[in-house]
Image (cartoon, grey):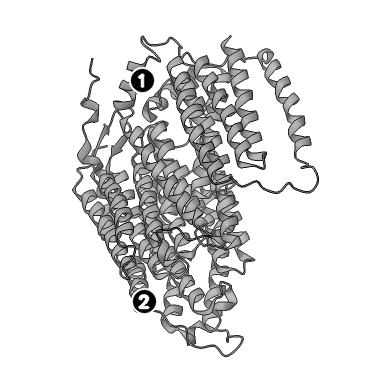
Amino acid sequence: MEGFLFYLGGAMMLLGGVAMVASRSAVSAACWLVLSFLGSAALFAALQAPFLAVLQILVYAGAIMVLFLFVIMMLEGPVMPAEAGRPKFWIPAGALVPAAIILVATARWVPGAGLPGFPGDLPPGFGQPVRVAQLLLGEYLLAFELISIVLVVAIIGALALGSNERTLPWK
Amino acid sequence: MLPDLAGLRGGAAILPELVLTGTVFAVLVLDLALRRSARRGRVLLLVTCLGLAAAATAIAGVSAGAQPLFYGMLVADGFALFVKGVVIAAAVVGAILAALSPEIRRDQLGEYLILLVCLTLGMCLLAGARNLLMLYLALELVSLPSYILAGFRHGDRRSSEAALKYVVFGAAASGLMLFGFSLLYGLAGTLDLPGIGAAVVARGLQGGLDAQLLVVVAVLLSLAGFAYKVAAVPFHMWCPDVYEGAPTPFVAFLSVAPKAAGFAALLRFFLSGFGAPLGFPAPGEFPWPFVLGVLAMATMTVGNLAAITQDNVKRLLAYSSIAHAGYLLMAVAVGSPLAIRGVLLYLPIYLLMNMGAFLVVMAVHDATGSETVDGFRGLGARAPYLAVVMAVFLFSLTGIPPLAGFIGKFFLFAAALQTKSMFFYAVAVVGVVNSVISLYYYARIVRACFLEKPADAQAPVRVGSPAAALLGALAVPTLVLGIWWGPLLGVVEKALLLPR
């Protein structure tokens, strides 16, 4: 069951990611991104972290993407002109998919495929909101705060690069 | 039920990082508040430099110790503090360069400085990270502003291309590295570097062939991320294009500071994760020193051979920086105390000579509009000061005594020879041959300065007094450290001597 969820989620994320990069309009790119987020929610579910899976859907696929789409539509998101001719990279990319499926399906019979790992017993309370909160505001507090600085960089960077063409009202 | 908060103690040890964060927001607010003021640029530069100076002072005040902070996320040992000092010094020079350069639009100087300080913050955290999660986050905090700053030359196709190539390469390298980290986590069940080291050593020795193979794959994948950050072969391809396209003041910074932080993280990854001094492997162990040594040889050779044919000085210096990553990688492969001392000694020296060389390139470009070797023709007559300091920086990069670069290289090669192993003798010989090759292309620029006449009658190249002063501040230590390196070596030894 977990294996099935893993491959399903992984395939959703891959498909969503590739289609997002390849799509010519900002709106459909955002919609493909939602698929990718749903795939990662499936991965969290497969890892027995239902709380994170729900959060992923509520916060990312829900709130953030709605905001995203809203802004894109308000700004009349750009649609890049279609390229002349069909893109050629689909053929090798398409050939990789069956190859990957065969590889994954046969990996089980490769000698020594039972890879070593640490014992996988879940600690009590794993994945529950209380435990997540404790980790977030305890052990991983510094990392959690650091992410906010990474986000500040992303915002300033978007403004700095985006103000390329037109001057911003406050400049 | 409250979690145990004891692990959160140690706020004093991250005071430099807190000061840097404060500087980011101070510049952000001032940039907005002073938007109509004519003195905005100067005030922002001053605040940035003051913030960086305060962070440097805070570093001096941190009592170095090996005890883990924040649940083992960070450590503030002498090694980390020294690298932080180098990185902050590079940031000060980088901020002044940006303010001097016409390539950075005046109304965007604030954003540039904010991103520069964020980058510095990321590098400081990288130098002290002892947990894979922290390591990865710090690396992203270094990468993200770098991508943006590489594309800062507006309306310039090459700058945008540089940024895009950097992003694509960077994303691929971080992907590989994350895959490696996840395998390491799967093996060890912890993200803590020493914990991983213990688990990996135990499993690698007891486990069968599968376990050993998995360790090898995981570490090689992790190595990809570091190799990308320090521009080592085979992840060096972004380097020349990014250096050529990105604004010169940023390239000067990029060529020094992220490399220093990347080497610090690489050293900690191998030394703290895989047992103290690597030495040469016991039979049955995977020969990391051998792998790193081969990478070092490849990196030096590719960098130096490719540099010979370059006409664009920024591309030439890009390949030269790849070559220098190779020399440093050689010392990382050795991993002995002498080698670590050599790496730490090399970083500030490399800062002086490389940022100096880029400052001259920037001055020549701003005056003549040329970035090629031909643009340096007759510089000795047109701007004697520039030509002389450029010669100092370039000969120092080659490693000719009595300049600082010689001392830096001397310690790196001494560390390789001290191992008394045939393999490292071979690596050192390759390194020496490469240094000779490098003399050829560095001397090409010096020859253009002093022995060739300009193609047409050109006006003298003028340098502003701030740039001239900064050049002097970089050139004088380059000369002095070549003769009197004792004090710097003393600082390095003190940093390494403190309890680990």
**Along the line of sight, the residue nearer the viewer: B20 or A74:** A74
Q: Residue shown at 44%/36% (left/top)? A: B136
Q: Residues within 10 Å of mark 2 (few under 14, many from 20)?
A: some
Chain ID at mark 1: A
Q: Is residue B327 visible?
A: no
Instruction: Locate the N terminus of chain B and report the quarter of the image it occupies.
Output: top left
**Along the line of sight, the residue nearer the viewer: B457 or B160:** B160
Image: B131 above or below A124? below
Q: Position of residue A8 (x, y in %)?
A: 62, 18
Secondary structure beneath label 2: helix
Indicate the quadrant where residue A109 lies. Answer: top right
Amino acid on which disc 2 is placed? Ala
Report which residue position mark 1 lands on: A132
**Along the line of sight, the residue nearer the viewer: B306 or A4:** A4
Amino acid on which disc 1 is placed? Val
Between the C-alphas of marks 2 and 1, the distance is 55 Å
Q: Residue shown at 67%/17% (left/top)? A: A107
Q: Label 1 near label 2: C-beta < 8 Å?
A: no
Q: Is residue B54 visible?
A: yes
Secondary structure beneath label 1: helix
Q: Position of residue B82 (x, y in %)?
A: 30, 49
Q: Position of residue A140 (x, y in %)?
A: 34, 28
Residue positioned most to the right: A85
Q: Which mark is residue B468?
A: 2
Image: B35 above or below B165? below
Q: Position of residue A155 (x, y in %)?
A: 43, 46
Instruction: Locate the C terminus of chain B and report the quarter of the image it occupies.
Output: top left
Indicate the quadrant where residue B97 lies. Answer: bottom left
Q: Is residue B18 left or right of residue B199?
A: left
